[in-house]
């Protein structure tokens, strides 16, 4: 998996599946609008070049905790590509 992040706008553009050859094999999610990342979060992603994507959950922290406690939450480590 890889998340494409635009440096100029500090925003997430899409999440893609990357095959064993390192090619973008399938687009899993494309942002319908610019999703700007908080400055501290962007700086961390810029240094680590990886993120952990988790879901499914609504946007609230409480929903994420509920899904985790119920065993419904899936997570994957993703490499970040900067465009």
Image (cartoon, grey):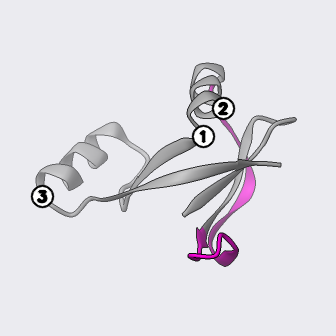
Relative to 76, 16 lies left or right: right
Q: Residue at x 64, y 76 (%)?
A: 21
The spot of residue 10 in percent (x, y) is 76, 35
Disc with the residue nearer the chain's start (3 vs 1): 1
The spot of residue 50 in percent (x, y) is 53, 43
Disc with the residue nearer the chain's start (3 vs 2): 2
Residue at which label 1 appears: 49
Kindly indicate the quadrant of the structure image that contains residue 27. Answer: bottom right
Q: Are marks 3 and 1 in contact (CB under 8 Å)?
A: no
Q: Are marks 2 and 1 in contact (CB under 8 Å)?
A: yes
Verify whether residue 19 appears in magenta: yes
Q: Nearer the viewer, mark 3 or mark 1?
A: 1
Residue at which label 2 appears: 46
Q: Residue at x 12, y 50 (%)?
A: 69
Kindly indicate the quadrant of the structure image that contains residue 15. Answer: bottom right
The stretch of residues the image draws in magenta is: 17-38
Relative to 57, 16 lies left or right: right
Please rate how many residues cluster around mark 3, counting C-alpha atoms within 10 Å: few if below 14, some from 14 to 19, many from 20.
few
Is disc 3 placed on a helix, strand or loop?
Answer: loop
Residue at which label 3 appears: 70
Relative to 73, 25 lies left or right: right
């Amino acid at each position: 998996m890889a998340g494409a992040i635009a440096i100029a706008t500090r925003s997430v553009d899409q999440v893609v599946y990357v095959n064993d050859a390192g090619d973008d094999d399938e687009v899993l999610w494309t942002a319908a609008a610019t999703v700007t990342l908080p400055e501290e979060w962007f700086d961390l992603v810029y240094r680590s070049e990886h993120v952990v994507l988790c879901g499914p959950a609504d946007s609230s922290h409480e929903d994420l905790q509920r899904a985790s406690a119920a065993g419904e939450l899936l997570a994957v480590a993703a490499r970040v590509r900067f465009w």
